[in-house]
Amino acid sequence: MRNLGDNELKINIIGLGYIGLPTALMLTKGNYEIVGTDLNQKLISELADKCMRFSENGMEELLKEACNRDIRFTVEYEQADVYIVAVPTPYIKTSKKVDASYVIGAVTKILKVCPGDCVIVIESTISPGTIDRYIRPLIDGHEGVKLAHAPERIIPGKILFELENNSRIIGADTNEIGTLIKTIYQSFCKGTIVTTDIRTAEMIKVVENTYRDINIAFANELTKICKEAELNVYEIIRTANMHPRVNILSPGPGVGGHCISVDPWFLVGDYPGLANIILAARKINDSMPEYVLERISEIMEKEGINNISRIGLYGLTYKEDVDDIRESPTLQMLSIMKKHLASGIKVYDPYIKEKILENQFLEFKEFTENVDFIIIMVGHKQIIEQLDIIRNKIILDTRNVIEIEGVYRL
């Protein structure tokens, strides 16, 4: 491997999605030779034309700047000094264990082209022990190939800010490899970078997202309890959080995204019988879309609404002001309805510009004109800024983001 301080150091990023692409672009600030690889030829063509596939503050500008520096996009894996693997890691629905097939596939292809001396960095979130179980056996016989784990710590909507400012963990087998990878990430990361061993790094990332999942589950369970007790859960949480050692998160219609709704399952799958609170939290959060449906049914009966086609779901993404629909609570809820042969409910999201559902509207005004009962599933700024348009509708606000008299809450 060439010297780390040498500007000729070549880095190949594998997977150009929400994690891989921003990382590749940020790495161009370090004056390394950067190659971004993805098997999707259409995506590669779009990036070569400086076109973004997803919306993110500052990304289009960064893409244009990076293209003026030393970066290329290709469907081919290339010889490089360092490989950063940022591919999906879903969980297996039956066993709840991590599905490492994408990572295994990427590493297998890397080994076919890599030089004798290189470092493979797994940035995808994986369960503790994944590298030992699945990746180390692949590199047996490749003595010069070293491994590291640098799990991502970013959220859509703040990707570039968090890439630059969040602290990072780097797991490596030796101090030498840890320092090498740390130096690369320091080319754009201003946060504290901690080095440790690989299994510890794997566990830390999963624990972070599991902690948040459990906290959200407490808020959601508290919502159900307060509904039964006829108490205002929002007032209770707000007042309880005045205590200096209490920080209850906000309840909602479910948990989405690729991290919080997925990573805790890794621990449930690997440690059955031990991950009891984690399993309970996952069940509570996964139950929320169905709980929202129950609330919709109660409100329909109370308001005398019979026609489901006059009901509209506002928000398809998993969080506010982004276009990411992965594991979206709205899509979870629609899936439940489909199982019960319920159809006709209308949907709108200002961040989803193309039609992906049969009853989806692309214009807010048209959506509101065709519904009498609106369920706010996502607290986009757009609906907060346009309250006058929906003020006379029946509203269920699952995110507690609007202040209109008579609005129903969870």
Image (tube, rainbow, N blue to C red):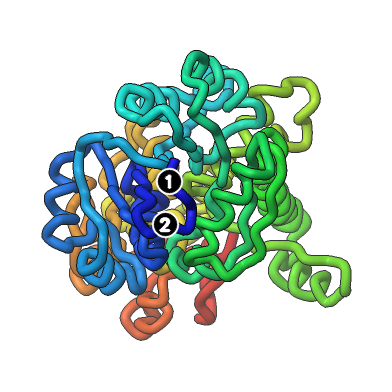
Position of residue 349 measured from the top left corner of the image (x, y, whole percent): 31, 62
* Residue at 33 percent of width and 25 percent of height: 109
- Name the image quarter holding the C terminus: bottom right
Foreground of the two, 225 or 34 = 34
Q: Secondary structure at mark 1?
A: loop
Residue 44 vs residue 250, the one in the foreground: 44
Q: Position of residue 129 (x, y in %)?
A: 65, 26
Residue at 78% from the left image edge and 69% from the top image edge: 236
Please state which of residues 67 and 326 is positioned toward the viewer in this rendering: 67
| Residue 2 image label | 1
* SS assignment at label 2: loop
Residue 14 in the image: above or below residue 208: above
Image quadrant containing the N terminus: top left
Is 409 on the left or on the right of 373, as rendered? right
- Give amino acid for label 2: Asp
The crowding category of the residue bearing disc 2, from other C-alpha atoms within 10 Å (few below 14, some 14 to 19, many at least 20), is few
Q: Is residue 304 visible?
A: yes
Is 233 located above or below residue 143 in the figure?
Answer: below
Question: Can you identify the residue that label 2 sits on?
Answer: 6
Q: Are marks 1 and 2 in contact (CB under 8 Å)?
A: yes
Q: Name the one closer to the observer, 240 or 91.
A: 91
The amino acid sitting under disc 1 is Arg
Where residue 308 sits in the image (x, y, percent)? Answer: 32, 50
